[in-house]
């Protein structure tokens, strides 16, 4: 079955939980490719560590969609 997501839903999913803790590297690679294709910024390398340590962190805003 095929799932359809809008950009905002994909952005929310990426920033809600760590994708790299998913089903392995292939899952992360797939999510990353989708984000790059749809111009969605990914959390930085230290985002989840800082969040878990209760340091202040900021979301990168969702940019305007590019026309394909």
Image (cartoon, rainbow, N blue to C red):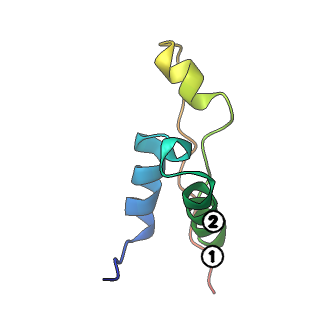
Q: Can residue 10 be seen in this view?
A: yes
Q: Relative to 7, does residue 49 appear above or below in the rendering? A: above
Q: Where is residue 35 in the image (x, y as percent from the top left)?
A: 59, 63
Q: Nearer the viewer, residue 67 or 52?
A: 52
Q: Quarter-wise, where is residue 9 in the image?
A: bottom left
Q: Which of 45 and 64 is in front in this view?
A: 45
Q: Where is residue 30 in the image (x, y as percent from the top left)?
A: 58, 65
Q: Which residue lies furthest to the bottom in this view?
A: 68
Q: Are marks 2 and 1 in contact (CB under 8 Å)?
A: yes
**Alpha-carbon neighbours of circle 1 within 10 Å: few (<14), some, or many (≥20)?**
few
Figure quadrant of the N terminus: bottom left
Q: Relative to 28, does residue 58 appear above or below in the rendering? A: above
Secondary structure at numbered mark 2 = loop
| Residue at 62% from the left image edge and 53% from the top image edge | 25
Left or right: residue 29 versus residue 16 is right
Left or right: residue 52 versus residue 29 is left
Secondary structure at numbered mark 1 = loop
Q: Can residue 57 be seen in this view?
A: no
> Which residue bears the numbered disc 2?
39
| Residue at 40% from the left image edge and 51% from the top image edge | 12
> Which residue bears the numbered disc 1?
66
Q: Give the Cα distance between marks 2 and 1.
A: 7 Å
Q: Quarter-wise, where is residue 68 in the image?
A: bottom right
- Callout in the foreground (2, 1): 2
| Residue at 60% from the left image edge and 60% from the top image edge | 26
Label disc, if present, on residue 3 of the rendered structure: none
Q: Relative to 56, does residue 63 appear above or below in the rendering? A: below
Earlier sequence position, callout 2 versus callout 1: 2
Q: Where is residue 28 in the image (x, y as percent from the top left)?
A: 59, 55
């Amino acid at each position: 079955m095929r799932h359809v997501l809008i950009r905002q839903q994909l952005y929310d999913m990426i920033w809600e939980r760590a994708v790299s803790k998913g089903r392995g590297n292939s899952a992360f690679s797939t999510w990353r490719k989708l984000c790059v294709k749809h111009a969605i910024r990914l959390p930085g390398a230290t985002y989840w560590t800082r969040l878990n340590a209760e340091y202040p962190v900021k979301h990168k805003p969702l940019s305007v969609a590019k026309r394909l």
